[in-house]
Image (cartoon, rainbow, N blue to C red):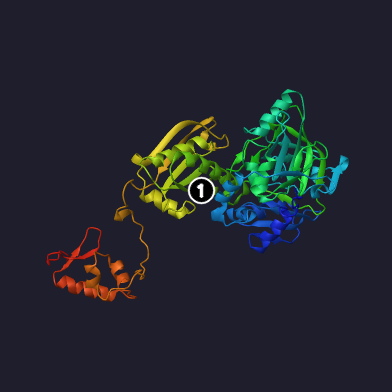
Amino acid sequence: MAAPDLERFRLRPFVERLVEIGEAIVHDAPIDLIDIAAVLDGNPRAVLFTDAGPEGTELVGGVTGSRARIAAGFDCPPEDLLALVLERLAAPRELVEIGRAEAPVQTVVLTGEDADLTRLPVHLQHALDGGPYISSSLDHVRDPETGLTNLGCRRMMVRGRREAGVDLNAPSDLKAIYERAAARGEALPVSFVVGAHPTDHVAASMRLPMDELELIARLRGAPLGVVRSVTGGVMVPADAEMVLEGYLDARGHVEAEGPYGEFLGYYGVMKRNPVFHLEAITMREDALFQTSTISGREIRHSETAQINALRVEATLWRALQTAIREPVAVCASPASGGSFNVRIAMRQRVPGEARNAIAAAFGSLANTKNVFVVDEDVDVFSDSQMDWALATRFQPDRDLVIESGFRALPLDPSLGGVRTGSKAGYDLTRPFGGPPPLYFTVPEAPSADGGAEPFDSVEAALADGPRTFGALVAALGSRDGREVALALDEIRGQGRLDRLEDGAYALAADGSGGDS
């Protein structure tokens, strides 16, 4: 097998590409680490800092903070992103082990006193956070029971030179793997990648029953070069910017971690969590440090919301393919954290399918609370079109579905501390059956293109069949329309003009027109 390209999916050239296409800005002025978050918070573009902190480090944030930037990582337009992700997830790809001498991420290896978390440009992200956080770390762990690599996204609260708190409260594969190891009294080796391509971040959000390094390869659409970590033997992508190697000790959930600004735009409270012990830092010679945007008032621009949205859409699409005949589009609103509010567009084939779509979303997505279902003529990515559909196609006593007793995300403050919650479905579809009546037809601008040889008069066009005024204009190839009004007035004056219920004009069959 040919050696994989170890530069194609590197973070640094991708960031340079974002700058070229206007999706990232370069901040060349020196900046203190305490000021980094204010520049990134709510910023619609990624930011490359070239002189961060007293060391003058290069630091990038907001890389996956828009659908356009994630799509750029997949080399596709945003509207094709979900289809491409689903296509790549279904196509197996190879893992190719790279020797340590050839792995760019192990060009520099720091151990002992040189392995120091506080030498990295780790900044305070939110005013009430429990400390500076490494927010863009992708954890890689080998499950001792299966031998497979597990991949996830995990924040790290720096507690000192070689210790960090790692959040393992929420249900996850890593939590289960760690707690089994701790029950045996064993530490768990873990390697955190810091500085990764957008495809890798998307892979870390997915869950499929396989070695999850292959998820990275599948989403890249290419073989993945992997290298064994220097200390714990965990496999990681060989083309990453930096890896923090170490272990979670066996004491369990023992140390305070947090508070932290979470992806729903509120703080997560302080928790007891395991402790990560740093043993080595490996990196490229010119490693680019990465930070992720998580919270704030404009969470639609945060990386967590955008990554969550894509993961939710992929999950929902697969569920809809078994629940209804013809799903058209899905959207998880980034402003809801990318998961709490979802939108489904469908082409109704039989009565009741909108309710089936709502039920599929309820059952397949634990975090989703509000489900909006529309017809295919509504753009689910348009807030204004969704607001219009809610205003004009919804009756609360007829079209609202409410169910309770679902597992809920504890971070949702509206739960009031309970563990289960309710879900609401909004059926915003037109009444099923037949063509939509005029009052459900969306007005569009007229066109003078009749698509056929034009008629030489209005009467000749009406003799061919009833037509709306706009259709008469097109039938005559008119670029004006006023002459059509005059011709209709003449026929009306002769008592030979009728109007149909849909507003179309017609010649009166018996010569006694009913139009007035």
Is residue 230 at all visible to an observer of this figure? yes
Q: Residue at x 87, y 41 (%)?
A: 113
Judged from this view, the residue extending furthest toward the right is 113
Q: Note whether 45 is above or below 100 in the view shown.
A: below
Find residue 351 and report its horizontal and vertical position in percent. 35, 41
Judged from this view, the residue extending furthest toward the front is 1
Is residue 295 at all visible to an observer of this figure? no
Find residue 478 and report its horizontal and vertical position in percent. 32, 75
Judging from the image, what secondary structure is the residue with disc 1 in? strand
Write down the residue under mark 1: 331
**Front-most of residues 244 and 430:** 430
**Front-most of residues 291 and 377:** 377
Q: Note whether 16 is above or below 409 in the view shown.
A: below
Find residue 446 and report its horizontal and vertical position in percent. 35, 67
Among the 4 quarters of the image, the one containing residue 98: top right
**Front-most of residues 310 and 269:** 310
Among the 4 quarters of the image, the one containing residue 76: bottom right
- In the picture provided, is 287 more to the left or to the right than 18? right
Quadrant of the rendering where the C terminus is positioned: bottom left
Q: Residue at x 49, y 33 (%)?
A: 421
Q: Amino acid at mark 1?
A: Cys
